[in-house]
Image (cartoon, rainbow, N blue to C red):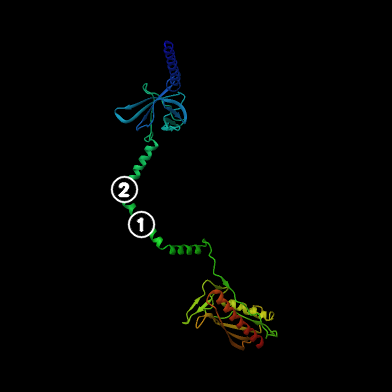
Amino acid sequence: MENSARYTLIGAFALACLLAAFSFVYWIKNVGGIGQRALYEIRFEQPVSGLAIGASVLFNGVRAGAVTRIALDPNAPKRVTVTASLDPETPVRADTIVDISYQGLTGAAAVALKGGTADSPRLTSNNGQPPLIIAGADVGRSLTESAQETLRHIDGILDQNAKPLNTAITGIAAFADMLGRNSQRVEGLIGGLENLTGSGTPKAGPPVYDLTPATAFPQVTKTIKGQLVIPDPSAIILFDSQKILIRDGAGTYTSVNNAQWADNLPKLVQARIVQSFENARQLSAVSRPLDQLNPDYRLELVIRSFQIALMPSPKAVVDLTARLVSDKGVVADARVFSASISAKSTEAPDAVGALNQAFSQVATDIVTWAVGAI
């Protein structure tokens, strides 16, 4: 029992000596020590959260000493004076800036000294007192305090502008509601602007339909002696378009939905009449007007009707007048050519099919007549 008590006392004494040795080494390295140290007083005019005696003092991020004393001023409750023990070689100058930094995962506070120019004088003691460094107005404020201060400012701004903000939000809500109710018009307007500027995605146009020329000419056995030209047919502006027209019983014209001719109708009729003559073995005798060509005859065409008539039932109506005019301006012959073909419906395929049959019949009659008249 006596031996156990003796060992306990020996162990406690050894532990106390070990702790004393560590404390002595720490004091030598960080606080005072045997070597020469330079003392500085740093004055803060606001709280310095987390700073404690023994905290590191950094100069440009490098450890240069430690905090040896923290004092409060009874006459200035906001003031905190910190005494720092630094390596005398630390280049603390009159324009050195003081800050508080937080290190590591624990966020331990440290005094951070930064910068200073080479031309600025070194800080020296005055009347035996350590040199004084005065920290800036916002030094020592933590991130939490800065966030709280910012939030207080935001609250103040919101309080001062509550009514204008409410008016603005109400206006935005009303505008959004208006856009929702007129979304189709807005989309149409934006689409129009995109088409105007060429920045939008081009929309696919309606299906395009062509006229079919005449191909069978059992009664045409001779070739035209001379040259025949076919100018553009004349037509009122109603027919001078790419629309595939529909005429109702009241004489009102509309167009076939989602369909159009491959070219303006007079141009298309001219091309297919010329092709019909070519199919009747008149290739060398018939052409469009050419500057260097002096034709013997000119076939003048007028489009009088080219539409789907609804009454009494849907049918394709093609009505053209043709005049053969000689090179001396004499009308050799003139006729009206008409054809009417029933249409299954006014849908594009049925309407175009019926119009093609009617036009092919008229083209056959015109070619047969012209070849025989010349």
The circle on residue 171 is 1
Q: Residue lying farthest left? A: 75
Please state if 147 lies on the left or on the right of 318 as rendered: left
Does any portion of residue 335 appear in the rendered image?
yes
* Residue of label 2: 160
**120 on left or right of 336:** left
| Picture quarter with the N terminus | top left
Q: Is residue 296 above or below residue 59?
A: below
Front-most of 155 and 182? Answer: 182
Residue 350: where, in percent of width, then height? 56, 76
CA separation in Å, label 2 and label 1: 19 Å
Within 10 Å of the Cα at label 1, are there few (<14), some (14-19), or many (20+) other Cα atoms? few
**Secondary structure state at the residue bearing disc 1:** helix
Count of picture labels: 2
* N-terminal label among 2 and 1: 2
236 and 119: which is toward the camera: 236
Give x and y (percent) for residue 77.
30, 30
Amino acid carrying label 1: it is Gly
Q: How crowded is the residue under tag 2: few (<14 C-alpha within 10 Å), some, or many (20+)?
A: few
- Residue positioned 41% across, 60% down in the render: 180
Looking at the picture, how far across and down is residue 144, in whole percent?
A: 38, 37
Q: Residue furthest front?
A: 1
Q: Nearer the viewer, residue 232 or 255?
A: 255
Q: Is residue 139 left or right of residue 208?
A: left
Check residue 73 in the rendering and tell me which mark sits there, or answer none. none
Mark 2: which amino acid? Gln
* Of marks 2 and 1, the one in the foreground: 1
Q: Element type at marker 2?
A: helix
- Residue shown at 31%/48% (left/top)? 160
Q: Where does the C terminus fall, quadrant-wise?
A: bottom right
Q: Report if the CB atoms under discs 2 and 1 are less than 8 Å apart.
A: no
